[in-house]
């Protein structure tokens, strides 16, 4: 079984999101990678006698979804902050796809920020659905309940308290959402989109 590798991210100084927050958040990401690998390894061991270990394998599989999605979601998240804030390219295909959904990019962004304000912990995620050739936004509880099957991740904001608690109290998470979008590298989002539609 091939191990999952912890990625390294080049995240510079951010506006409204402290170095302490990023440092602690990256430690949490490293924990997801570590636990994904531990469970992956244990499942391999228990599968040597799958009938005897059926219950344990089932519970490990359940936990694997949580750890694995925690790992992958954070990789998308941190990639969107690499390289500093950058605007969408002038001829952005992503922006054109947004404008097929709603009348303007700004209207869509306001709605997506409102989705991120959903009560509880989780992620606001924007996917591309190849079957219907449209963007689909959703709320993902925690990180494994609500992921949409067969859709490609374009953009996602982590709305667990660990993503902002060093900088903002939970009552001010809207400020964190604004800070995230002030720092986003839209060129990376464009790349995610272009790769998804090809």
Image: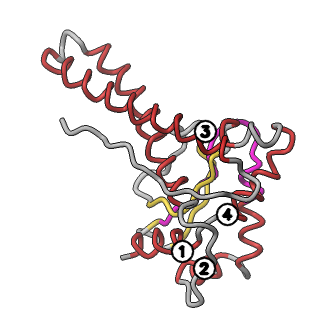
Residue 160 lies left or right of residue 45; in this view the side is: right
Q: Which residues are magenta?
A: 113-128
Q: Residues within 10 Å of mark 4 (few under 14, many from 20)?
A: many
Q: Percent from the top left, x then y, of residue 103?
A: 73, 82
Q: Percent from the top left, x then y, of residue 9?
A: 47, 53
Q: Percent from the top left, x then y, of residue 16?
A: 76, 54
Q: Is residue 121 magenta?
A: yes
Answer with mark 2 or mark 1, whichever residue precedes in sequence: 2
Q: Residues within 10 Å of mark 2 (few under 14, many from 20)?
A: some
Question: Mark 3 highlights which residue?
Answer: 141
**Tags 2 and 1 touching, CB below 8 Å:** yes
The disc label shown at residue 198, or none: none
**Tags 3 and 1 touching, CB below 8 Å:** no
Q: Is residue 122 magenta?
A: yes
Q: Nearer the viewer, mark 3 or mark 1?
A: 1
Question: Mark 1 highlights which residue?
Answer: 187
**Tags 3 and 4 touching, CB below 8 Å:** no
Relative to 6, say whether 138 is above or below. Answer: below
Question: Mark 2 highlights which residue?
Answer: 88
Tell me the quarter of the picture where residue 155 sits: bottom right
Question: Of helix, strand and loop, which one carries label 1?
Answer: helix
The disc label shown at residue 183, or none: 4
């Amino acid at each position: 079984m091939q191990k999952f590798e912890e990625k390294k991210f080049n995240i510079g100084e951010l506006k409204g999101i402290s170095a302490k927050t990023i440092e602690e958040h990256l430690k949490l990401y490293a924990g997801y990678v570590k636990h994904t690998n531990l469970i992956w390894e244990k499942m391999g061991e228990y599968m040597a006698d799958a009938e005897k270990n059926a219950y344990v394998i089932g519970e490990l599989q359940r936990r694997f979804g949580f750890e694995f999605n925690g790992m992958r979601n954070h990789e998308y998240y941190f990639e969107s902050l690499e390289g500093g804030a950058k605007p969408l390219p002038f001829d952005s295909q992503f922006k054109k796809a947004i404008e097929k959904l709603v009348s303007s990019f700004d209207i869509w962004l306001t709605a997506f920020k409102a989705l991120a304000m959903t009560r509880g912990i989780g992620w606001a995620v924007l996917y591309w659905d190849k079957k219907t050739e449209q963007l689909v936004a959703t709320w993902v509880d925690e990180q494994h309940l609500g992921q949409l099957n067969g859709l490609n991740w374009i953009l996602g904001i982590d709305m667990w308290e660990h993503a902002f608690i060093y900088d903002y109290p939970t009552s001010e998470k809207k400020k964190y959402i604004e800070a995230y979008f002030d720092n986003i590298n839209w060129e990376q989002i464009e790349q995610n989109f272009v790769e998804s539609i090809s």
